[in-house]
Image (tube, rainbow, N blue to C red):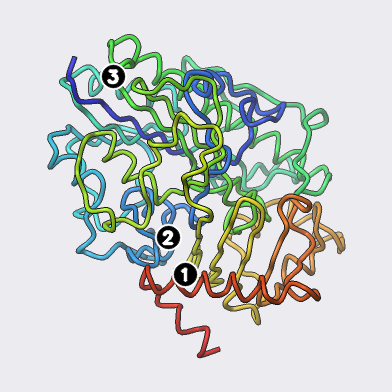
Amino acid sequence: MSDRPNIVLLVADDHGRDGGCFGTAAPATPHLDALAQEGVQFTRAFCTTASCAASRSVILTGLHNHANGAYGHVHGAHHFSCFDQVVSLPVLLKEAGYRTGRVGKYHHAPERVFPFDVVLPGPGRDDVKMSENCRGFIAEAEPFFLYWCSHNPHRDGRTLDSHPCRPNRFGNPDQDFPGDAEQLYDENEIVLPSYLPDTPEARAEWAQYCQSVSRLDRGVGRLLQILRDTGKLDNTLVIYISDNGAAFPVAKTTLYEPGMNLPCLVRSPRHAARGTTCDGLVTWADITPTILDYAGVEFAPDRFHGRSFLPILDQSSPTDWREEIYAAHTFHEITNYYPMRVVRTQTHKFIWNIAFGLPYSFASDLWRCATWQATVRSGAATFGSRTVDAYLHRPRFELYDLVNDPAETVNLADRPGYAEMVEAFSAKLRAFQQETKDPWLHKWEYE
């Protein structure tokens, strides 16, 4: 066994805080639950942009996406890519003597910025098989870095013509994978999150989402078993996160809590914490510096926008830690220009909707989803816990008291008595933008 730790970073695709260890009855996530019992769950962990490629660019660079150049999706017509001068996590770990491998969803560009020694075959939605494909890589010499990225529970864009409530499904809902039986959910028995309407369409889609999360969970379980089988688990840091929230309106692409407050499970052989939680504020900009810190790689404190959260891993409520985190979403697809800048504290969230004069811009998969289309057809005035009008037409500023209004439906920004708080948060955002060289900084004056 090497005296240097192995590192496994698992990134789900559109998984919100849904599962047993996150406090919901469904989906069933026994392997993620076990991972939480063997390590630490960060309860206040956040992506900085709730869009797949942009979020992943932050994860592997430690830089906000408006600074690394990946403003939105990399593929197809969207073509957002990182700047050539960015030095990513796999490069830094390779320079430090690590074998690097990746499997599953990639969603980065250009490849020269995100090179890996080994690219393992990722068989679509079959996460158990994907983990098995990693067995040989894991069994080889230490230390290694494995970047394991599921396609679950992302929607896959296909439709089931026989069931009008289920367009834009969550992948293979009607077939088992070889050696891996699907776990089905009764749409009439599941409990929907409060941000969704209780409609047949939402229930049908949520049942498929739960099924896809359980498929992901089984893949995680198989990977952990392979680490045990090869004798590597006791020398391996395992981090499980998701790129953004579930692929439903009010979650994915938004910076409301369902879109950005995400799973973060950390199993570290070098720390005492087991089955504990930490409520320290962390973001995906912290992932790269945390991993480098664990690997013993030295770096300048100001090299990244994030910082290592290893010092608070054994603390349930750290006192000597940051007081706020920042988020910066600009695009999903190229057609989804809706820039938002956010500061979130332990008690409040402040959102600056930079293009507030425009209707909120939908990602194509969220617009097509049966849950939203049923709302459009019915002419309903509400969508879950908020009004449709409030979701589509947002003010310049949104300010929420997260302690008394966790659903973020009572905007305090224009209310008497909150003007000083709005100005204070605005000043914090301007300072954040200045520090991170945000091109949207000039919008404070230009618009």
Closest to the observer, 85 or 308 = 308
Q: Hey, what amino acid is under mark 1? A: Ile
Q: Could you tell me residue 297's position as x and y percent? A: 20, 40
Q: Hey, what amino acid is under mark 2? A: His
**Which numbered dot is residue 334?**
1
Tell me if mark 2 has few (under 14), some (14-19) or many (20+) residues whose alpha carbon lies within 10 angstroms of its own.
many
Q: Are marks 3 and 2 in contact (CB under 8 Å)?
A: no
Closest to the observer, 120 or 429 = 429
Q: Hey, what amino acid is under mark 3? A: Asn
Q: CA distance from mark 1 to mark 2?
A: 7 Å
Q: Could you tell me residue 263's position as x and y percent? A: 54, 37
Tell me if mark 1 has few (under 14), some (14-19) or many (20+) residues whose alpha carbon lies within 10 angstroms of its own.
some
Q: Which residue is mark 2?
A: 73
Q: Are marks 1 and 2 in contact (CB under 8 Å)?
A: yes
Q: Which residue is mark 3?
A: 235
- Identify whether 362 is placed above or below 17: below
Mark 3, mark 1: which one is toward the viewer?
3
From the image, which quarter does the C terminus lie in?
bottom right
Question: Residue at coordinates 73% horizontally, 65% vertically from top-left?
Answer: 391
